[in-house]
Image (cartoon, grey):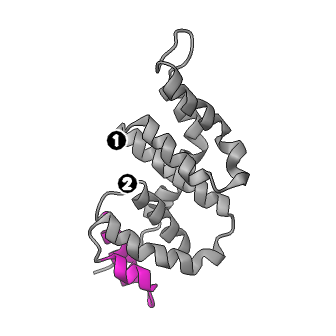
Amino acid sequence: MEEALRVWIAAIESRYARDGEWIPWADAWILKLDEPPLWLLHVCVEQSSREALSVLYPGLAYSWKEWSDPLDWIRLRLGFYYLAHERDQSDLHALFVKVFEIAENCNTIEAEVSELLKLWREVGERPAFVPGYRSLAERVAEAFKPFSDLARLKWSRLHDELPQIQL
């Protein structure tokens, strides 16, 4: 359940998950579990992303000690922000601002985001396409691939592991 909590927070915070998308998932787990966690009971009635996050973040703080690799949390968040950008075709500059806001307090992820930093500089300095080179969008997708692959995997597992309820 703790991993699911982190996946939902990252997906909702990045706007990858749409308002209310977590409700059927939470309802299915509540019916399946003998003693569902308190955050699960509360989030199933929250319609907006803001309200859902206000319930989920305290649950994350409670279970943080169980997080095996804190870098995975950052990677997951970066991946969901990219997936939301890819789906919505949002502003590339805004994506990079958020990415570096997330990564700035973690020195150990600097090597992983160094290519993203180079690409961010290009957003302001060059056109999106230079003849003879791959487009900026292609290079950004490639640089985000490890993060977006992680987010896709976790999102898929979240939904693949949904309990089947017998009514």
Q: Nearer the viewer, residue 63 or 165?
A: 63
> Going 36% across and 36% down the picture, which residue do you hit?
89
Mark identifier at residue 15? 2
Q: How many discs mark residues in the rendered view?
A: 2
> Going 56% across and 40% down the picture, which residue do you hit?
144
57 versus 35 height, above or below: above
> Can you give x and y, in whole percent of width and height, for residue 45 in the image?
28, 77
> Can you give x and y, in whole percent of width and height, for residue 77 in the image?
52, 55
Quadrant for the C terminus in the image = bottom left
> Can you give x and y, in whole percent of width and height, for residue 80 in the image?
48, 51
153 versus 82 height, above or below: below
Q: Which residues are magenta?
A: 21-44
Q: Residues within 10 Å of mark 1 (few under 14, many from 20)?
A: few
- Chief SS of the magenta region: helix
Answer yes or no: do the residues labelled 2 and 1 have beta carbons within 8 Å?
A: yes
Query: Label 1 sits on what residue type?
Result: Asp
**Mark earlier in primary sequence (2, 1):** 2
The alpha-carbon separation of the residues under discs 2 and 1 comes to: 10 Å
Label 1 sits on residue: 88
Q: Was residue 22 drawn as part of the magenta stretch in this picture? A: yes
